[in-house]
Amino acid sequence: MSAASPPPTPAIPATEATPLSSYQRLIIAILAFLQFTVILDFMVLSPLGAFIMPALKVSPSQFGFLVSAYAFSAGLAGLLASGFSDRFDRKKLLLFFYGGFLLGTFLCAIADSYYFLLVARIVTGLFGGVIGSTVFAISADLFDYRQRGRVMGVVQTAFSASNVLGLPIGLYLTNRWNWHAPFYLIVATGVAVGVVILFCVRPIDAHLKARPDKSPLHHFVHTISTPRYLQGFAATLLMVTGGFMLLPFSSAFTVHNLGIGVERLPLIYMVTGIFSMVCGPLIGRASDAVGKLKVFAAGCAGTVIMVLIYTNLGLSSLTIVILVNVLLYIGVSTRMIASSALISAIPNPADRGSYMSISSSLQQISGGIAALAAGMIVKQEPGGPLEHYDTVGYVVVTTTLLTLIMMYFINRRVEYAARLAQVGAGSA
């Protein structure tokens, strides 16, 4: 690893971004679909618990380990791949890991025992955990900074789409046939998009020309020791930890504290997901037009207000609960979309894959930390309401405000690099 100081944050071009070409639109559609299949594969297991547990004769604790095995293996894979992720054409890297992900999903589809399914989930996580980071690296490689808000706005809607479209379809197929069917569907559709990537996506290898470091270990150490990268990692870790503290107990809070019947939960999630899908691209466009930091700050303000309202609600009507959930998720989505676009300007092109791999791992790990921390705060008597859920809300508000401060300084660094580039271009 060179002893010279690392180059500054990549500069933002001074000119306005050009409209998206037809090829760029194809890339966005492919990236969004990739995220949809990966997120759906991760999320679909939880609602299938009612079918898998009796079918494979597993206990609740064993099923919990099935769910967490994916997250832990995905986090480990991101760290292991970080030293290698900038050494290859990103198209080839994506095809390799997507192929492994589909193989793992196929193993889930044919699993006939607990341990078989556990190994299949680990395999799926090992490959799937690298896909997300590769998607974001490609987004930064192929799109100008002033276009990335639009890209992130579409790609991030994969989470909402998996709730609105994927989970209901998965449950329908399970009821129609068995719990193996959703995994077969993911494999079939995944193979189709893999063929599209193979024949329609051009090589993505411009970063290879800028990477002087040939050692994976040195590349990894360089990435985790660069100060501005650490700043981005810290913001990501704190943002995801705070945001995911509410999710594990949201359904229980809705039922036991807000007085909404279990049978109404799908309606709440469906309406919330639809609004998130519609607003995601609009939020992305706004972050490009108005500015990433301004949109992120607006998302933080909305998140703080709605978290305080939501976690302090009592018995409420279904209409109020849906309205609060929609506004809360829009605030959270605004933060995630704007921050993803802004943070994409931190790493140099030669370090982008490594940076995104480590960042993806931190997201997986921080999600586990969030669930653990929330579980230590929240208490519940058998059949009673959740206690101290408002305390979780105050923690989320605190982390939200802290990330706003951190993103302010990240934005200053990005803008400073842009000004330097403009001065250099003028003198040239």
Image (spheres, grey):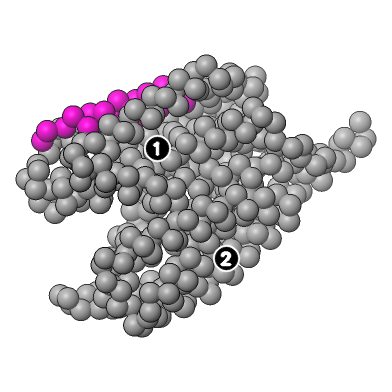
Kind of element beneath mark 2 = helix
- Is 220 displayed left or right of 47 in the figure? right
Query: Quadrant location of the N terminus?
Result: top right
Q: Which residue is mark 1?
A: 37
What span is colored magenta in the figure?
A: 94-113
Give the quarter of the image for residue 96.
Answer: top left
**Depth check, front residue: 322 or 376:** 322
Measure the C-alpha gap from mark 2 to mark 1. 28 Å
Please name the residue shown 47% across and 77% down the image: 308
**Depth check, front residue: 353 or 131:** 131
Tell me if I can see residue 389 in this picture.
yes
Magenta stretch encompasses residue 104: yes
- Crowding near the residue tagged with mark 1, few <14, some 14–19, many ≥20 C-alpha atoms within 10 Å: many
- Is 59 displayed left or right of 245 in the figure? left
Q: Furthest residue to the bottom?
A: 314
Q: Which residue is mark 2?
A: 300
Is 225 situated above or below 305? above
Tell me if I can see residue 344 in this picture.
no
> Residue 168 location, x and y as percent?
32, 49
Query: Quadrant location of the C terminus?
Result: top right
- Mark 2 or 1 closer to N-term? 1
Q: Furthest residue to the top?
A: 199
Prevailing SS of the magenta stretch: helix
Please name the residue shown 43% across and 40% down the image: 36
Identified by mark 2, the residue type is: Cys
